[in-house]
Image (tube, rainbow, N blue to C red):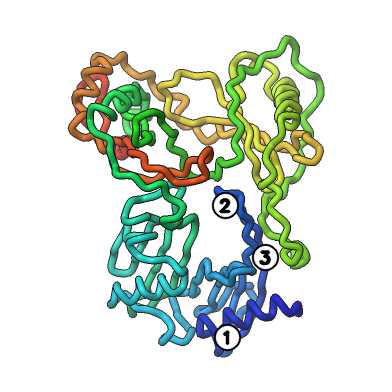
Amino acid sequence: MNEQLQEVIEDTRASLGLNNHYLNRYHFYREKNHFNETAYILNMEWFPDDAETSGDDLNPAGTVAVDVNFYTKAVRRIIFVGSVNSADSSMYPTSEAKEGVIEWIEEMTGLTFGRQFLIARDDEQLLQFEAAVDNIPVSPGGIIRAEFNEDSVLTVFYIDGDFPDEEQIEWEPFALIPDKYEPIASAQCQLLELPDEDKEKWVPVYGIEEVFLTNDAGRTIPFTFGVDRSSFVGRDEVLRWDEPLEGEFERKDIDLSPEVTLETVLANASHPDTKPLTDNEVAVCEREVLRFMRLVYPNDTGKRRLTGFYLKDDYIVAEIKPIQDARNVLDIKIKLLIERDTLTAVNYFDQDVLFERFKHFAKADEPLLSLEEAFDKLGEHLEVDPVYIYDDSRGRYIMCGKIDCAYGVNAVTGEVVVLNDLK
């Protein structure tokens, strides 16, 4: 076995109290974060020495699944199968002592409670934390989760995302007052159409779209969730053509797995997605999108638009959305995967099939309330909280206000409703 790999394995065994376990299998994964930093992760499955294995390839109770950063040896994930902590119990906290859990997390992560993370959820068998600097949330941020079994013993730990420190922050006092943020919030108020599955009908509702506002109220930063969009190159192009193309689109198998070999890990090369899209790549991909549309959606000229490209595991993903009423909240899109080395489209996912069940819904009634009347009703429910947002142009987190509202106004009845209750 490779000497460096053996060192990481033995360090994991010692640090997690796995002396009565044996390493059954391991894999390597490669990741990229929002800051274009590459991490190589060693995933291990440790079986208890006395475990009874079966022929169904299922891990026995007490198996420990562990993810460790190969180069820093930082533990990213611990999961005890069957909620059975089979390791040295003296090395793990219990849910009975919250302070002990926090101290254990600080030791495992090198983070400081209150200065880099705070409690987001506190249940009997679950403690969840979120990234924060001096108790102010950050975005993009991170999450830490600790779960416990009925005996109060830790059985799940994981950490994901980014946890900046004070050196990455442009500190300033939160200065947004109503005179500054209310005009922005009013501009974010819009008429939406939400599906009511009980009545099988679309319902017109006024709501305020989440947005971040810089502390000087000079600009807004869109709220994004989920997929890493740091490589995103925006476009707003209506896709039109005079004639369709004859022939068929050849779909190929794709590999979006982050798994890599030991040789790749030892080379310690940057993730391929850290190399930004070039102008030439974007131009060629635009032509490839049009070719794809003429082949697969020949009758949709002028009905869809290209919204942008981003990188995903050495593929270029093109987002194609229908040109539809902006009030419709269903974010239906086609994701076209383009090989980066050949700049040729190889596969696609059409999300339209996911929303078939809404197509027979009755149209929404015409609104009786004006936008101004709706915003007046939502004013008392408006929330503006301080949050540090990463500014790509500065390479640092800056103070912003998160403008949000959990309520909406039925545009016909004027009733104030909880938006989550309508989804």
Which corner quadrant holds the C terminus? Answer: top left
User: What residue is shown with label 1?
Assistant: 21
User: What residue is shown with label 3?
Assistant: 28
The image quadrant that residue 189 belongs to is top left
Inspect this view and state whether residue 204 appears. Answer: no
Separation of marks 2 and 3 at Cα, in angstroms: 17 Å
Q: Is residue 278 above or below residue 82?
A: above
Residue 417 is situated, as x and y percent measured from the top left of the image, at 23, 33
The residue sitting at 61% across, 24% down in the picture is 306
Question: What residue type is disc 3 on?
Answer: Phe
Residue 169: which disc? none
Q: Viewer-nearest of labels 3 and 1? A: 3
Question: What residue type is disc 2 on?
Answer: Asn
Residue 378 is situated, as x and y percent measured from the top left of the image, at 22, 29
Q: Nearer the viewer, residue 333 or 197?
A: 333
Q: Is residue 29 left or right of residue 341?
A: left
Circle 1: is it few (<14), some (14-19), or many (20+) Cα within 10 Å?
Answer: many
Circle 3: is it few (<14), some (14-19), or many (20+) Cα within 10 Å?
Answer: many
Q: Nearer the viewer, residue 202 or 211?
A: 211
Q: Is residue 173 left or right of residue 287?
A: left
Q: Viewer-nearest of labels 2 and 3? A: 2
User: What residue is shown with label 2?
Assistant: 33
Q: Viewer-nearest of labels 2 and 1? A: 2
Separation of marks 3 and 1 at Cα, in angstroms: 20 Å
Q: Nearer the viewer, residue 360 or 78?
A: 78
Q: Is residue 350 above or below residue 268?
A: above
The image quadrant that residue 123 belongs to is bottom left
Circle 2: is it few (<14), some (14-19), or many (20+) Cα within 10 Å?
Answer: some
Element on which disc 1 rests: strand
Q: Is residue 206 above or below residue 10?
A: above
